[in-house]
Image (cartoon, grey):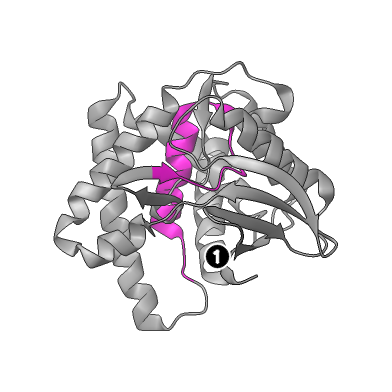
Amino acid sequence: MKMIGQCNTAEIYAFEEKKILKLFRHGIPRELAVDEYEKALYIQSCIENVPKANEFSVYDDRYGIVYEKIAGKDMIRVMLQSILKINHYSRMLAHTHLEIHKTKLKPEQNFTVKERLKGNITAVEALDETKKKLLLDYLAELPDGDSLCHFDYHPGNIMFQDKEPIVIDWMTAGVGDPCADVARTCLLLSYGVLPNSGFVVKKLVAIFQRHVGKIYYQEYFRLSNVAEKDVEKWLLPVAAARLSEWIPEGEKEALLAIIDQWLKKILEAV
């Protein structure tokens, strides 16, 4: 098989006609792979613009999921090739996200945004127990919500097939407050760092991301009844949970700095 892509947890291979195989790396537990497969089946029963999961498989002692192949380019490449339309695609990013959030689901204990954030914050090694308790107490007071949330929503996870946006990579999806999902996207576009790149490339990408984020943010507020303060209150727990993932050192340092600032404000208000 020919590898056509990869991420932190898996490699993507061309499979049968109009199909791809997401093959999880050695060491990824079966439970994680099965969870993604079952989540994919559930989500594709709720909304249309997602790649369909066909089957769960084991290949060369690794777990895998056979997905429908989406023939097209991701939004990042489309933006870079049509730079004069960057505002158009940034607004489309907001439109598509809002459509996802219109899907209302019954919250389940293992499929909620708050439970995921709680687990991730608990696992962060860079935060001491005092800070974790503050964060978890703060998180508990935030609204639960009943919207479908992608929770890794950014231009790299939007593919265009026949000019229609298809949202991929639902591994982190859950039910919750859509403001938490918007906060996560804003953090990714504001602080996400491109690994293994030179200083100039990182600076150019950062400027590009911030511009996309600004237009996306404005458009989402224009289309929805969400207020900016409703998103801002989610930034702290979302940033803390992000530290449980593998992220470049520069992004980690930036997130730790803003987390300390926000926690200081919380303590001063007590």
Q: Which residues are magenta?
A: 166-194
Q: Amino acid at mark 1?
A: Glu
Q: Depth check: give the residue in front, 247 or 253.
A: 247
Membership of 175 in magenta stretch: yes
Placement of 8 over or under 264, stated as above or below:
below
Image quadrant occupied by the C terminus: top right
Task: Identify which residue is drawn at 67% across, 53% down.
Answer: 244
Element type at mark 1: helix
User: Splitting the image into 4 quarters, where does residue 34 fall?
Assistant: top right
**Horizontal arrangement in the rendering, residue 72 relative to residue 7 (left or right):** left
Coordinates of residue 5 in the picture (x, y in percent) = 55, 67
Coordinates of residue 142 in the picture (x, y in percent) = 56, 25
**Horizontal arrangement in the rendering, residue 242 relative to residue 226 (left or right):** right
**Horizontal arrangement in the rendering, residue 116 relative to residue 190 (left or right):** right
Residue 150 visible in the current orientation: yes
Placement of 250 over or under 15, stated as above or below:
below
Residue 118 visible in the current orientation: no
Task: Identify which residue is drawn at 27% across, 66% down.
Answer: 80
Q: Depth check: give the residue in front, 16 or 42.
A: 16
Placement of 3 over or under 125, stated as above or below:
below
Membership of 167 in magenta stretch: yes
- The extreme top residue here reads 106
Residue under numbered circle 1: 253
**Horizontal arrangement in the rendering, residue 11 relative to residue 232 (left or right):** right
Task: Identify which residue is drawn at 31% across, 48% down.
Answer: 162
Image quadrant occupied by the N terminus: bottom right
